[in-house]
Amino acid sequence: MKNVPVQKNQELELTIEDLSYQGRGVAKVGHYPLFIENALPGEKILAHVLKVSKNYGFAKVVERYNDSPERQANSKLAYLQTGIAPLQHLTYQAQLQFKQNQLRELLHKVHLDQIAVAPTVGMAEPLHYRNKAQIPVRMVNGQLETGFFKQRSHQFVVLHDFLIQDPRIDQILMVVRDILREFEIPAYNEPAHSGILRHIVIRRGHYSGEVMVILVTRSRKLPAANQIAQEIIEHCPDVVSVYQNINPARTNVILGKTEKLLAGKEQITDQLNGINFAISPQSFFQVNSLQTEKIYQFAIEAAHLTGQETVIDAYCGIGTISLNLALQAKRVLGVEIVPEAIADAKKNAALNRIKNVEFQVGSAVEWMKKWADQDLKPDVVVFDPPRKGLDSEVLASALQLAPKRIVYVSCNPATLVRDLRFLADHGYAVAQPIQPFDQFPQTNHVESVTVLERTDK
């Protein structure tokens, strides 16, 4: 490729200068960046160039001549290669700093340096925190195996310990795998679109200890389905619900739209900040219960609720934030585009006897416009949007509603900063340092809470 200073398969001695937002080491040849997995700032390496494009390339470490003081000893390559734990080679304190720096750098790029970023709130135990596992299975040497795929490939890596999952989930996974082997259930073959079992999904209540097992199949028929379910419950008494989910599509989406309860209860229950939640196979429920509680507590304190406020929760899901807010506010209005989530939210409100919350099916745009037309004057709007952040129409509706305060719970620093720039230009100022939370330790994901106040109150 013309005017590119490196070539594919070239070997170079390099010094790592920085970490990309994905946790890859960055080295430069002239001004040309190379992204290198499992390489940390300050490390000198021999690198092999894997791929070259016009503006950047990728390389791998052939030899590392020194270790960064921030390198975590005993990290396993499999967790890096599969993307399960792309930062596990970085000490935990350095991971927390990396996440704070991501927000600072993005704010700097859009000239919002005046907004402070607090130190990241981490975990005392930054491993084994996930209460949900979605594990692909494949046939390896003639038997069904659990594992994960190498990033950007179809190469299956056999794994039995997933590092960031609740250890009990890993134990149950092995029991389920062995039962499926006994019944000779063939794993999914992706190229041929044949075989039966695609994924094993396991959810465990952090506080309740209740476990749901979901067997995701390509075909409607799962041989000996009821016997398999009974065996799972006999071997694991904490499993209180076993489902078959049917996903016949050629897709990387894990769950299909159809499911059958094979044994036990329709839902498992768990708590967040003392509020009970019923969780179905398709329910969105935060995977890190301990950090989610901290985030919600912070968001509610930041909303300065006195019991007299009307609050809108614009992406309410199954009501996790709404019900927390309802304990402190006069009235909460929740909206979510997924009808099943709203059905769960209503059940969860009834389960906790919380009556000052109303849930609506629809888009945030649709309902915020409707509320603005009804001349509703919310005191606080809470946003917890997906990774793409807030649509321009949602932002416009928020300005029309003109709440005194906006609490923005973000899972993507890039879209957060974009939206903050817009709100800063339209009468809202960040009222206190942005608070990052390490919701997904060992990964590059950054969750944060930002509080904005209207400047023309």
Image: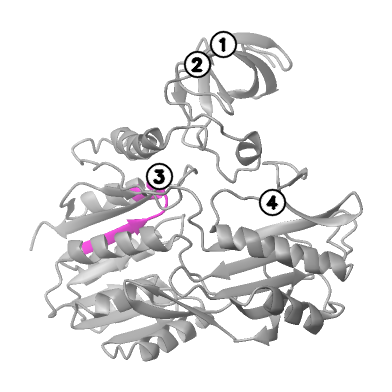
Looking at the image, residue 402 sits to the left or right of residue 388; the answer is: left
Looking at the image, residue 364 sits to the left or right of residue 190; the answer is: left
Choose mark 2 or mark 3, whichever is in front.
Answer: 2
Q: How many other residues sit within 10 Å of disc 1, few (<14), some (14-19) or many (≥20)?
A: few
Estimate the spatial distance between the alpha carbons at disc 4 and disc 2, rounded to whole Å: 31 Å
Could you tell which of marks 1 and 4 lies nearer the N-terminus? 1
Helix, strand or loop for disc 1: loop
From the viewer's perspective, is residue 287 above or below residue 76?
Answer: below
In the picture of the structure, the residue carrying the numbered disc 1 is: 65
**Label 1 is placed on what type of residue?**
Tyr
From the viewer's perspective, is residue 402 above or below residue 45?
Answer: below
Give the magenta-colored segment's residue range: 406-416
Q: Is residue 204 visible?
A: yes
Whether the residues at callouts 1 and 3 have beta carbons within 8 Å, the answer is: no
Estimate the spatial distance between the alpha carbons at disc 1 and disc 3, rounded to whole Å: 34 Å
Could you tell which of marks 4 and 2 lies nearer the N-terminus? 2
Whether the residues at callouts 1 and 2 have beta carbons within 8 Å, the answer is: yes
* Position of the C terminus by quadrant: bottom left
Looking at the image, residue 204 sits to the left or right of residue 158; the answer is: left
In the picture of the structure, the residue carrying the numbered disc 2 is: 43
Q: Residue at x 18, y 83 (%)?
A: 330
In the picture of the structure, the residue carrying the numbered disc 3 is: 414
